[in-house]
Amino acid sequence: VGGLGDVISGLGKALQRKGHLVEIILPKYDCMQYDLITDMKVYHYLFVFWLMLQALDVVVESYFDGLLFRNKIWVGTIEGLKL
């Protein structure tokens, strides 16, 4: 992986061994090695506790440089770490 990726995965695994729940959030770049990610799929359920909001087929909207983007949330596992 190299650089920051090595730090994130190493720290995540160390925290898991100590009993912590570790989930990594990152953008779904086209250059990622998707063959290393197991169980990769679009997340179809979202519950936001503090808003008491539940949703299926979640699309999160965001703006960048004046443009609206409709983003899907993907989940998977790599080297035992949840994405």
Image (cartoon, helix red, strand yellow):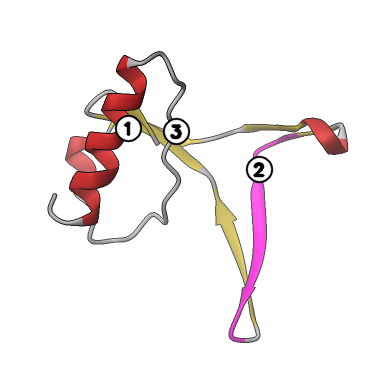
Q: Main secondary structure of the magenta part?
A: strand
Circle 3 packing at 10 Å, graded few (<14), some (14-19), many (20+), is few
Question: Between tags 2 and 1, which lies in front?
Answer: 1
Q: Is residue 56 toward the left or the right of residue 71 in the image?
A: right
* Among numbered discs 2 and 3, the one appearing first in the sequence: 3
Amino acid found under the numbered disc labelled 1: Gly
Q: Is residue 11 toward the left or the right of residue 42 in the image?
A: left
Question: Between tags 1 and 3, which lies in front?
Answer: 1
- Which sits in the foreground, 43 or 15? 15
Residue most extreme to the right:
52
Q: Is residue 39 above or below residue 10?
A: above
Question: What segment is highlighted magenta in the picture?
Answer: 55-65
Q: Which residue is mark 2?
A: 58
Q: Is residue 45 above or below residue 2?
A: above
Residue occupying the point 55% across, 50% down = 72
* Residue 71 position in % (x across, y down): 57, 57
Residue most extreme to the left:
2
Q: Which residue is mark 3?
A: 23
* Among numbered discs 1 and 3, the one appearing first in the sequence: 1
Q: CA distance from mark 1 to mark 3?
A: 8 Å
Q: How many marks?
A: 3
Q: Which residue is mark 1?
A: 12
Amino acid found under the numbered disc labelled 2: Val
Q: Is residue 61 toward the left or the right of residue 16 in the image?
A: right
